[in-house]
Image (cartoon, rainbow, N blue to C red):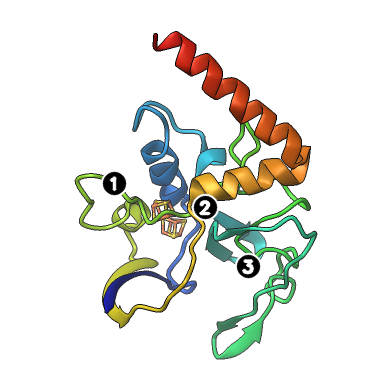
């Protein structure tokens, strides 16, 4: 079976650090859509070192309760670079929601947020960050691949996993049971 794979390619040489991608993502993911722009809600964050003219857009990618789940290294100008070598913090190329920093966390609840490729109904022609990157540092591609059997956590699962890490399983189960009882009573 084939599945559609969505890819955003990031060209670091073209990014000028304007942060239009952050604004577009934050507006699209506000509730209701486009009702406010809080870049802390953006699922793409641009790491910057203006003095070195370095701008690195990074998409929120996964939740981990570990302090560090490994540091990505990028090819820049045909050299392997970590964030540190690029004049940024060592964590700069990482899209994880982790306990070490406040990035990729919903500002009110602290729950993890990650790029959902702007899934919506009806679907967009291309993700918002790509659409508003006017210098084409972000480009969008779709391709078909053989589907592998995999269990993918969606945003709800990721949020619950993070709550369980913070409060423990029993408290989360109790809270869900209480809420479901409350909504059941309200709907009668
Ligand atoms: S694809 Fe959509 S959700 Fe992902 S970073 Fe871009 S605007 Fe945000
Ligand atoms: S919109 Fe494009 S150029 Fe501007 S910060 Fe984002 S990726 Fe870089």
**Residue 121 at what x, y percent from top left?**
23, 44
User: Which corner quadrant of the image does residue 92 belong to?
Assistant: bottom right
Tell me which residue sits at (50%, 57%) in the image: 17
Mark 2 → mark 1, Cα distance in angstroms: 15 Å
Image: 156 above or below 149: above
Tell me which residue sits at (48%, 17%) in the image: 183
Camera-nearest residue between 17 and 155? 155
Tell me the crowding category of disc 2: few under 14, some 14 to 19, or many 20 or more residues within 10 angstroms, Cα based.
many
State which tag comes first along the sequence, 1 or 3.
Answer: 3
Q: Name the residue under label 1.
A: 120
Q: Is mark 3 on a helix, strand or loop?
A: loop
**Residue 61 at what x, y percent from top left?**
55, 60
Q: Mark 2 points at which residue?
A: 114
Q: Are marks 1 and 3 in contact (CB under 8 Å)?
A: no
Tell me which residue sits at (41%, 79%) in the image: 148
Q: Is mark 2 on a helix, strand or loop?
A: loop
Tell me which residue sits at (22%, 51%) in the image: 123
Specify the label residue 93 is tagged with. Answer: 3
Q: Look at the numbered disc 1 and say if its residue's Cβ is closer than 8 Å to ligand 1.
A: no
Q: Do the residues labelled 3 and 2 touch (CB within 8 Å)?
A: no
Q: Do the residues labelled 2 and 1 touch (CB within 8 Å)?
A: no
State which tag comes first along the sequence, 3 or 2.
Answer: 3
Q: In this view, does 188 lie to the left or right of 141?
A: right
3 vs 2, front mark: 2
**Residue 137 at what x, y percent from top left?**
39, 67
Mark 1 → mark 3, Cα distance in angstroms: 27 Å
User: Which corner quadrant of the image does residue 98 belong to?
Assistant: bottom right
Q: Look at the numbered disc 3 and say if its residue's Cβ is closer than 8 Å to ligand 2.
A: no
Q: Look at the numbered disc 2 and say if its residue's Cβ is closer than 8 Å to ligand 1.
A: no
Specify the label residue 66 is tagged with. Answer: none
């Amino acid at each position: 079976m084939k599945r559609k794979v969505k890819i955003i390619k990031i060209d670091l040489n073209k990014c000028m650090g304007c942060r239009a991608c952050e604004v577009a993502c934050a507006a699209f993911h506000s509730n209701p859509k486009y009702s406010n722009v809080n870049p802390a809600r953006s699922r793409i964050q641009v790491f910057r070192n203006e003095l070195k003219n370095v701008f690195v857009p990074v998409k929120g990618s996964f939740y981990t309760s570990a302090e560090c789940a490994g540091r990505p290294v990028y090819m820049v100008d045909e050299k392997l670079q970590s964030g540190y070598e690029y004049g940024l913090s060592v964590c700069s190329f990482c899209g994880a929601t982790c306990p070490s920093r406040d990035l990729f966390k919903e500002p009110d609840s602290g729950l993890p947020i990650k790029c959902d490729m702007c899934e919506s109904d009806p679907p967009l022609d291309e993700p918002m960050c790509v659409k508003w990157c006017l210098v084409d540092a972000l480009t969008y591609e779709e391709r078909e691949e053989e589907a592998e059997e995999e269990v993918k956590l969606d945003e709800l699962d990721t949020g619950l996993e993070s709550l369980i890490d913070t409060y423990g399983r029993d408290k989360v189960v109790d809270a869900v049971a209480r809420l479901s009882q409350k909504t059941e009573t309200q709907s009668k």
